[in-house]
Image (cartoon, rainbow, N blue to C red):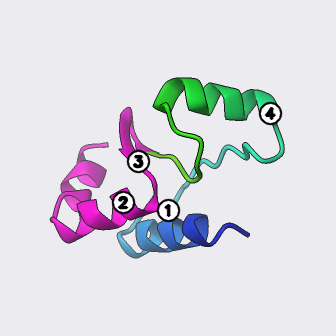
């Protein structure tokens, strides 16, 4: 339902990502608290590629525009 989540997943799929592990923080307050503790952010999505915290949707789009997304995906 989140438009930023939809955009982020669409970009990742365009770049060849077949499996996306989603953590639904809207359904589980404990997971939301863990996300905030881990990232320091309250907004969704919070995107990780492997162990690397990319940030939110805008951060993912900017990483892709700079040419950094594909190397990160290939290394994960």
Nearer to me, 52 or 57: 57
Q: Quadrant of the C terminus?
A: top left
Residue 66, quarter of the rendered image = bottom left
Nearer the viewer's eye, disc 1 or disc 2?
2
Q: Which residue is mark 1?
A: 18
Q: Which residue is mark 4?
A: 29
Closer to the N terminus: mark 1 or mark 4? 1
Nearer to me, 51 or 76: 51
Q: Is disc 1 surrounded by few (<14), some (14 to 19) or many (20+) residues within 10 Å?
A: few
Residue 63 is one of the magenta-drawn residues? yes
Labelled pair 2, 3 in contact (Cβ < 8 Å):
yes
Query: Magenta segment range?
Result: 48-76
> Percent from the top left, x then y, of residue 73?
30, 53
Q: Which residue is mark 3?
A: 55
Q: Is disc 2 surrounded by few (<14), some (14 to 19) or many (20+) residues within 10 Å?
A: many
**In the image, is residue 46 above or below residue 62?**
above
Nearer to me, 42 or 27: 42
Q: For numbered disc 2, what is the local secondary structure?
A: helix
Labelled pair 1, 2 in contact (Cβ < 8 Å):
no
Q: For the point 78% across and 47% down, which residue is it?
A: 26
Nearer the viewer's eye, disc 3 or disc 1?
3
Q: Which residue is mark 2?
A: 60
């Amino acid at each position: 339902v989140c438009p930023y989540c939809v955009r982020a997943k669409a970009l990742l799929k365009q770049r060849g990502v077949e499996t996306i592990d989603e953590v639904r923080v809207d359904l589980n307050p404990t997971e939301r608290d863990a996300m905030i503790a881990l990232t320091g952010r309250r907004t969704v999505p919070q995107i990780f590629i492997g162990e690397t915290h990319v940030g939110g949707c805008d951060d993912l789009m900017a990483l892709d525009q700079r040419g950094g997304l594909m190397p990160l995906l290939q290394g994960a």
